[in-house]
Image (cartoon, rainbow, N blue to C red):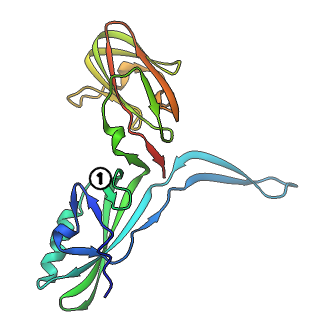
Amino acid sequence: MYQNENYEISFNGDTGGNHGVFLYDIPDITQAKHNYNSYSISGQEGELIVEDGSVSNVVVTCIFSVLSDDFRESIHALKRWLTGKGKLKLSESPDFYYDVLTIEHSGIEREIMRYGRFTATFICYPYEFHESGDIETASSTIYNPYDLCRPIYRISGEGPCVLTVNTKLMKANIGENLIIDTRRMMAYRDNGELKNTSVTGKYDDLWLPHGDNNISISSGFTVNTIPHWGYKA
């Protein structure tokens, strides 16, 4: 029986150790893949590769060792914990996390009455986020130390305005507040009301590349940025 007690995962701030279980082995991480189409051209060696711009999700597979006098109840408790969306952290990189989209539970391998293994597969957005990128800032100059990121902008004010990011523009009509979410490519108010028709421009123009970035907005308005930076998976 092998238990990797020195390696831990955290999901939504809770750990396997808190549930009396340990990882059977280091998690298996299937990296994201860029999707593409290939075309054969008569008379040409090889194929033409054209990326379609989409990227597959990251898959993190964790096998837990479960040792319990009430094995079935321990499995039920694990399933309650490992359900839904949230943040997945690995102990080897505690300042980074994956954004979990859903979790799949696989079959239970039972070896003896009190011991078995339970597999959970985390389907994650294809990006490894750094916690510092969740901090909201009002700075007009932002240095991105990581890869290209897709920030959230919070705008306050009343009426039409122009948001400028590195010379790229997005026009917006603000009714007290507006959130521009460039990852999900949508705009909405603080209360969740969709306001996609209140903006004009390209969401990807507002992404922040590695390095220095300049952000400004029309006079009479304020803009705060949540960069959500990290590394491409």
What residue is shown at x 48% (from left), y 52% (from top)? 233
Measured as percent of width and height from the top left, residue 23 is found at 31, 74
Dot 1 surroundings within 10 Å: few (below 14), some, or many (20 or more)? some
Give the residue at the far bottom of this rendering: 112
What percent of the width, then of the height, locates residue 213?
49, 26
Q: Is residue 140 left or right of residue 111?
A: right
**Image position, residue 97 (x, y; %):** 35, 52
Identify the residue at image location x=15%, y=80%: 72
| Residue closer to the observer: 143 or 115 | 143
Camera-side residue of 105 and 151: 151
Relative to 127, say whether 224 is above or below. Answer: above
User: Which secondary structure lies at badge 1?
Assistant: strand
User: Residue at position x 29%, y 52% from top?
Assistant: 87
Q: Is residue 167 above or below residue 90?
A: above
Q: Residue furthest front?
A: 6
Residue extending farthest to the right is 43
Q: Amino acid at mark 1?
A: Lys
User: Taking 76 as reference, is 5 left or right?
Assistant: right
Q: In which quadrant of the rendered image does the N terminus lie?
A: bottom left
For the image, the number of numbered tags is: 1
* Residue that lies at the very extreme toward the top in this rendered image: 219
Q: Which residue is mark 1?
A: 87
Above or below, comparing residue 167 to residue 128 in the picture: above
Quadrant assignment, res 197? top left
Q: Residue at x 33, y 55 (%)?
A: 94
Is residue 84 shown above or below 224?
below
Return the x and y of residue 185 as percentages of the image width and height: 41, 33
**In this orientation, which residue lies closer to the viewer: 24 or 116?**
24
